[in-house]
Amino acid sequence: MSGVPNVFGSATSSIPLSQLDVNFNTPLYIGNTSVGLGNTVTSFGNVTLVNPTLTNANVSISGGTDNGVVYINSSNVAVANPSVLYFNGTNLQVGNNTSSVGGAGTSAWLSVNKPIDSTSGTAGTRMIDLYAYYPGFTNSSPSASIVAGVYPAISTADGFLAFSTLNAGTLTEAGRFDYSGNLLVGTTSQTSFEKLSVSQSGNGQAALFNATNASQTQPILALYAARNTTNNSFYFLQCYNTGASANKLLIADSGNVTNANNSYGAISDVKLKENIVDATPKLADLLKVQVRNYNLKSDSTNKQLGVVAQELETVFPAMVEETIDTDKDGKDLGTTTKSVKYSVFVPMLIKAIQELSAEVAALKAKVGA
């Protein structure tokens, strides 16, 4: 310090009080760092602290590199007691529980410890808050938060990971993975045995699958099952009405479709149709259709009644469709399979009955004459 002799450590001289101002702001020099006394806040630069102990102090570290990064190198770094920051040379922990699961002995590079906020066992505790804001504006509330918890609340037997987002100013849980790896959206527990549970309490869709590729060739929704049965052992699809406590639609392992009222149909409004004319006679062609008994090669015990596509298309080619065979990944197998539009037989049979009725009426008239 220019003009003021001073030596630290084994001091041989001192600073006269007359040379210090009333606020003790006269700078001293430690190395190349200016140190103010009294009420002055001092910034230290290029200082190495060996085995420091900081107790009940507010410590701010900044700078270090051009981009404001500070590097801390030590086998153990701790602040105050209990520690809020712990570094053992390999793992970094935030929190004050260095002895429990996720503590100093964890293999994780970063560990965050905090007591749960609620004893309900479902709320958990906010572990990491994420803030997003426009430049020039501040955000006092986190935009999103990562939440962790345990089941039950007083145990560490089972845990969950939840994600919350800011909704109308309030952090609201958006979804969670429970202790079994189940993904729960809009709910905190399973309804049955599902791995994915989506609950919608508002007046909206619970789920929407939208394929936006204009050249789509793959299924929009694919349901796979490893069990190979055809005896209603399970259902590919179940539509259950909780208000009526009853099934409304089932698609069984055999492919059979069952609904509650035995009703199905097609959109048939006149506003959608044009070129409406009477159908041509169908009785003669229907008499050519071969009705067969058979069983599928994959199910030799189940006898069925119906037609063969290749035979039917010689009479009613428009009632037969052909699709490309693919594997479960959508790969073309190089073969095709034909199917029959059985429901089209209904209006054909109506037309044939009308023809038969007209013939009967003509015969009655002839006999009566």
Image: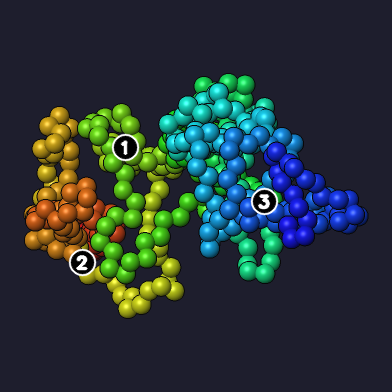
Alpha-carbon span between mark 2 and mark 1: 37 Å
Label 1 Cα neighbours within 10 Å, binned few <14 / some 14-19 / many ≥20? some
- Percent position of residue 286, x then y: 16, 57
Label 2 Cα neighbours within 10 Å, binned few <14 / some 14-19 / many ≥20? few
Q: Nearer the viewer, residue 70 or 275?
A: 70
**Residue corresponding to mark 1:** 252
**Residue corresponding to mark 3:** 30
Which amino acid lies under the numbered mark 1 shown in the image of this protein? Ala
Q: Nearer the viewer, residue 145 or 337?
A: 145
For residue 144, say whether it is visible.
no
Label 3 Cα neighbours within 10 Å, binned few <14 / some 14-19 / many ≥20? few
Q: Nearer the viewer, residue 160 or 36?
A: 36
**Residue corresponding to mark 2:** 281
Label 2 or label 1, whichever lies nearer to me, is: 1
* Quadrant including the C terminus: bottom left
- Percent position of residue 118, x then y: 68, 31
